[in-house]
Every structure is written in structure tokens, then in C-alpha cells.
Amino acid sequence: MTHVEYFKRQAKNLFKDYKAKTPYIDKLDGSTYYKYDGKYFDVTWILDDYRFIIEECGWDEGNLSLMNIQHIFAYMIGFEKWADLVNASNVELELAKLRFDNQDKISLEEWDAHVNEQEFRLDAEFDPEFKLALFKRGLLNNDGSQLEQDYRLCKNQNRVSKNISSENIQTPSLNKQITSLPLNKEDRAEFIKTANNVFENVIERIEPNNTEVTRKLWDVENYIDNFLTKDMLPISRNYALSLIDAFLVHEVIGLATKADKMVKQG
């Protein structure tokens, strides 16, 4: 099953849940509301969060079509409209599926806020490949805590009311912050381990002419001790780890070039 086929199925399931509704009249204001008895999704929650789409498009909540639901679903997982989802690249679709499948660990809303915050902080626009790597890094380092901020109705899942204070909801490891330097002992060890692993991966990819000399020039402790600067703080721990993946390749290329010059000079 392709990613697009997978999302088509999810949108159809959302539409099925939407149709499983019962209208009722509010005794106070006389308005018509709907109670949703879904099997797959918390329709009330979704429509509340994306009601602005319904209002902007002039749709009637009581008479939404499959196309309307597809539009809402696409927006929910990071696309402006359904056509953008259908025509998205494989990388964009992979990221969207990972986000959808792991929203109990990293909520859709918080992920968007996290990316926007870091793009603003670094005055940069991340491409899809970098966003995918960033998400995978955050997921790999997630401590397994369940946010329960999940639009899906999962079996045996204890749902959290939208009215519960965020203080009572566990924060995902993606949001753990580094607020001061130097790194503490535990974080420093993790950053050194990650940097060494990335270094070896880059060495295999670029295949420098003088591999052993390049390795001798590699000072992982010095790199990590100078990797973060105070003007970058506070920064998500997992985001900082992902930056090693993104930027270390340039460092290794620089070391390989230096190694070539050293060998040439004798």
C-alpha cells in the first residue's frame, strides 16, 4: 500500500465516523449541534480544532462531503489541501505518515510549533529531507511517554479531555530543553556518541583519500564542546542532536581536505 493509498483509507475512515452523527438541539440557544459516535477518530475534537477551515470555506458541518473531509485531513497532517498531499514527494509523504502514526508520542500540533520555532530561531527554512531526519531523531530519542493528544480512537487508549491543563500532560522528550552550557555529563556523553556514529557514517559515504589521517584529525570532544553556543539557547535536546546529522558532513569534508594537504606535503 502506498502512502497516498494509506491516507485515502484514513480519510475514508474519518468520513465514516463523521457520518455516524446524531443531531441535537441546544435548549439554551436553539442551535443544532452534533454528537459523533466514531470508530476510528475523535471527530468532535478534529472539527473543533479545524473549524476555521469549515468557516473559511463556507461549509455546513451537518453536510460535509468526502472531499471536504479529505481537505481537513490533509491540513491536519501538514498539507494545505488534499491535492498537495496526492502530489507530494515520497519524503514529504513519509514524514506525514510518521507524524500521523506517532501522534500519541509527538502531537501534530506540537511538531508544527517546534519546527516553526526552530526555523525562526535559525532564520532558515528546512527542506523536507531535513524535517524528516529531524523527526526521526526526535522519535528515536523519545522516552516512550504517551502524550495522549491523539485524534485517533485507539483500543484501550485513555483519552485526555481537551479541558485538562497541559501541566497534567507529560511533555515528550522532543521538547526537553538545553538551557545552559557546558552540557551536563549525561548529555555530553550522548552528544559525543552521536557525533562519533555520524562521523563514521560520513566517512563511509564520502570515502576520503586518506581515511586514517582524517580519523586522527577528528577531535570529537572539542567538536561537541564548541558545537552549541549560548546564543542558540534554549534549544531542544533532540533538535540539537539532529543538527549533528545535518552539519557534521561539512566538518568531515574539511578534515578530509586537510588530511590530503598534510599527506601531500609529506
Image: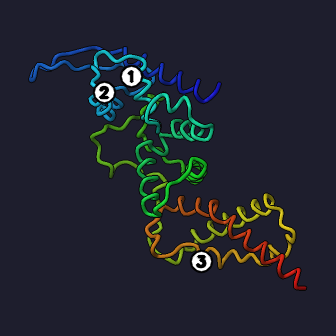
Q: Name the amino acid type tagged 1.
A: Asn
In which image quadrant can residue 20 be found?
A: top left
Compared across the picture, whether 259 is left or right of 177 comes to right
Q: Residue at label 1?
A: 68
- Residue 154 percent coordinates (x, y): 47, 29
The kind of secondary structure element at disc 2 is helix
Q: Name the amino acid type tagged 2.
A: Cys
Among the two numbered marks 1 and 2 on one chain, the one whose residue lies closer to the N terminus? 2
Among the two numbered marks 3 and 2 on one chain, the one whose residue lies closer to the N terminus? 2
**Up-down relation of residue 221 to residue 253 (above or below):** below
Which numbered dot is residue 225?
Answer: 3
The kind of secondary structure element at disc 1 is helix
Name the quadrant of the N terminus: top right
In which image quadrant can residue 210 be found?
A: bottom right
State yes or no: discs 1 and 2 in contact (Cβ < 8 Å): yes
Q: Name the amino acid type tagged 3.
A: Asp
The one of 74 and 163 positioned closer to us in this rendering: 74
Among the two numbered marks 1 and 3 on one chain, the one whose residue lies closer to the N terminus? 1
From mark 1 to mark 3, how far is it between C-alphas?
51 Å
Name the quadrant of the C terminus: bottom right
Of marks 1 and 2, the one in the foreground: 2
State yes or no: discs 1 and 3 in contact (Cβ < 8 Å): no
From mark 1 to mark 2, how far is it between C-alphas?
9 Å
**Up-down relation of residue 216 to residue 42 (above or below):** below
